[in-house]
Amino acid sequence: MRSFSKLSIVSVLMVLNSGVGAEIAAQKIMIGSFSTGMLEHWEAKEFKGETNYKLVDFSGTQVLKAESTGSASGLFNEQRIDLTKTPIMNWRWHIENRLGNHLNEQEKSGDDYAARVYVIVNGGAAFWQTKALNYVWATTSPVGKVWPNAYAYAGANGKMTMIALRSSEDKTGTWYSEKRNILADLKHQFGEDIHYIDAVAIMSDSDDSQGKVTAYYGDIYFTSH
């Protein structure tokens, strides 16, 4: 059933292997090298229906296109990143359309986003300590709003945090570039000095609203500043 399937995202976060990926001391670490035509290390996770992800040419540059029609699936890249060396996550994204303005994104019935990029800190055997920051292109929430994921069960309340990075005030059909200090964001949201993340994921989903959205993701990488 619907709520059960979305809850399965919590299970995915719990089982991510923190040992996957080597610690890299470079000043730039590529996570999503879409412009070179690579999807290596990205694994699909389906929650309800399948969002279609594929590499396409966009004005001469290869990017990742996501098309969701009443679906919820994402792509996960398990790689350990040392945030003390490369704390800044960089990416760009673009959406063609928005979901309906009736959504309450703080409720399960409105937990849909045209685009989201998120980082995961694996709790290992202590699964209740798994944490995730979701940077979302919101429909009804204003930029800067922060809230716990609607599908996080009580034991993980606040451990899957949503951050509205873009909103309905931002234009469709336009590329936006983002830089987030993940080290600082984790400290601010969870009150802890967290030095490593274990995975990065992207997802475009519309299963709750039964809508249709199309989004594009550019390269994702970490830098020292």
Image (cartoon, helix red, strand yellow):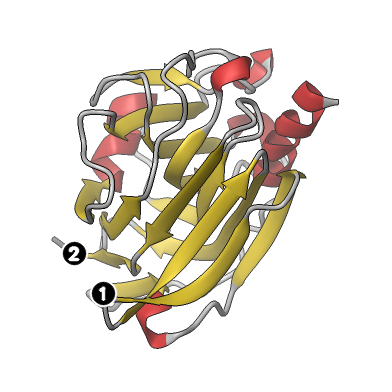
Q: Is residue 90 left or right of residue 114?
A: left
Q: Is residue 192 above or below residue 123?
A: above
Q: Can you give x and y, in whole percent of width and height, for residue 136 in the image?
A: 39, 37
* Mark number, residue 14: none
Q: Are the two marked residues, 1 and 2, in contact with CB atoms closer than 8 angstroms? A: yes
Q: Amino acid at mark 2?
A: Ser
- On the image, numbered disc 2 is attached to which residue? 224
Q: Can you give x and y, in whole percent of width and height, for residue 38 in the image?
A: 49, 83
Q: Can you give x and y, in whole percent of width and height, for residue 27 in the image?
A: 22, 74
* Mark number, residue 28: 1
Query: Would residue 36 be visible to someone looking at this image?
Result: yes
Query: Would residue 121 be visible to someone looking at this image?
Result: no
Q: Is residue 70 above or below residue 159?
A: below
Q: Quadrant of the N terminus?
A: top right
Asked which quadrant contains residue 186, the reply is top left
Q: Is residue 90 above or below residue 155?
A: below
Q: Is residue 160 above or below residue 132?
A: above
Q: Is residue 56 left or right of residue 155?
A: left
The residue under the point 60% across, 26% down is 209
Residue nearer the viewer, 117 or 30 = 117
